[in-house]
Amino acid sequence: MKKIAAISAVSYLSAAVLLAPSLASAANFAFQPRLEGGFLYYDFESQAGAFSSKPLQSDGSILTQQNSAQGDFRWKDTIPLIGGGLTFFVDRFFADLSIQYAFSGSASDTQRNSAFIEGGVGEFSTFSSLERSDDVDFDRTEYAISFGYSITDNWVVFAGYKKAETNFESDFNATTRTDNIPILDPNENITIATVDGELDYDVEQDGPFIGSSYGWRINKGAFDGTFAASLALAFLDSEIKQKLKNQKVRFVFPEESGPLPLANQTVPTLEGDTVGLTIGFTWRGFTPVEGLTYSLGIQGYNYDFDSDETLGEFTETAITFKAGVAYTF
């Protein structure tokens, strides 16, 4: 399993959990549902990777050494999100369930891959390139469950489990070109084929986390509430899955033909794990309605996947701005 290094800044707990001490001291048992909405800035970037292979000819014999490079691509957008959760308090103990869904993401970018084949045709070396343009739609879902204890009226410790899934769906167009074909001018670059198709690209992370939060009570004029900061350490397993489907190829050289259907292709899964430091900040204010509170928060993270021999480096960044309301029963 490949190692992934990460530094993140995101609070896994809602404002309700950050302020659990003051609520828990008010009653032996309480529960608090909440609703949240806001925006998510999401940025997924793949940096170039390089690898070597020995491709086969049609008769099964090794063609020659092939050195390939995968190009950069980046998908990013700011999209709406909705979420909610439920917190239970028993004395100074609490349990929290939460879910968040961000939707209607769209992005586009162009990826350029290349391959250099030594002696690819006769004694000639051949260079080929593939340029793929993606139009992407995506959404993201996060789930978390946590358990904690209020050490003081301001200080909370907690542990839990988190799962996140980002699903990209892309319509793409790819063009393959090559040069240095012996029967042509060696300096001429020839378009060989074009491919249209769809790409499913899924990024998944899950694992446990532990952390602590601290709140400061503020009561100055219109500001009546608590400002809280949270630190957490997450231990996540990560996977990136890719599948090409509904592909059709149209050959341009040596003669035009097609479009012809291609079989669906599943790309090998990239796996890894990460240990990340998390930070979150939340303001939770009281209202004239007893038991009703509101919250404002900002949270974000950045995961950096270590260099992979085949697929290069991947970076996932998310910054969330949320507002919410909660009621304590």
Image: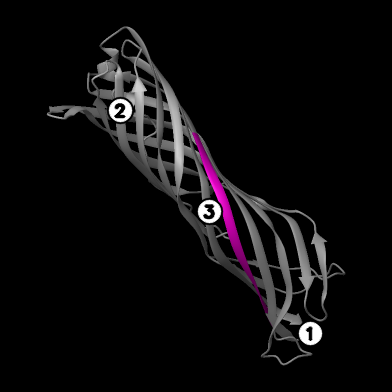
Pointer 2 with pointer 3, Cβ within 8 A: no
Residue located at (40% from left, 32% from top) = 36
Q: Mark 1 points at which residue?
A: 122
Cα distance between the residues tagged 3 and 1: 45 Å
| SS under mark 3 | strand
Circle 2: residue type: Tyr
Query: Could you tell which of marks 2 and 3 lies nearer the N-terminus?
Result: 3
| SS under mark 1 | loop
Q: Mark 2 points at which residue?
A: 294
Magenta stretch containing residue 122, yes or no?
Answer: no
Pointer 2 with pointer 1, Cβ within 8 A: no
Residue 316 visible here: no
What type of secondary structure mainly makes up the magenta span? strand
* 278, 106: nearer the viewer: 106
Query: Could you tell which of marks 2 and 1 lies nearer the N-terminus?
Result: 1
- In the rendered view, tell whether residue 192 sits above or below residue 260: below
Magenta stretch containing residue 137, yes or no?
Answer: yes
Circle 3: residue type: Ser
Count neighbours of disc 2 (C-alpha within 10 A) and say few if under 14, some if 14 to 19, many if 20 or more.
many
Residues rendered magenta in the picture: 126-142
| SS under mark 2 | strand
Q: Name the residue under label 3.
A: 106
Query: Could you tell which of marks 3 and 1 lies nearer the N-terminus?
Result: 3
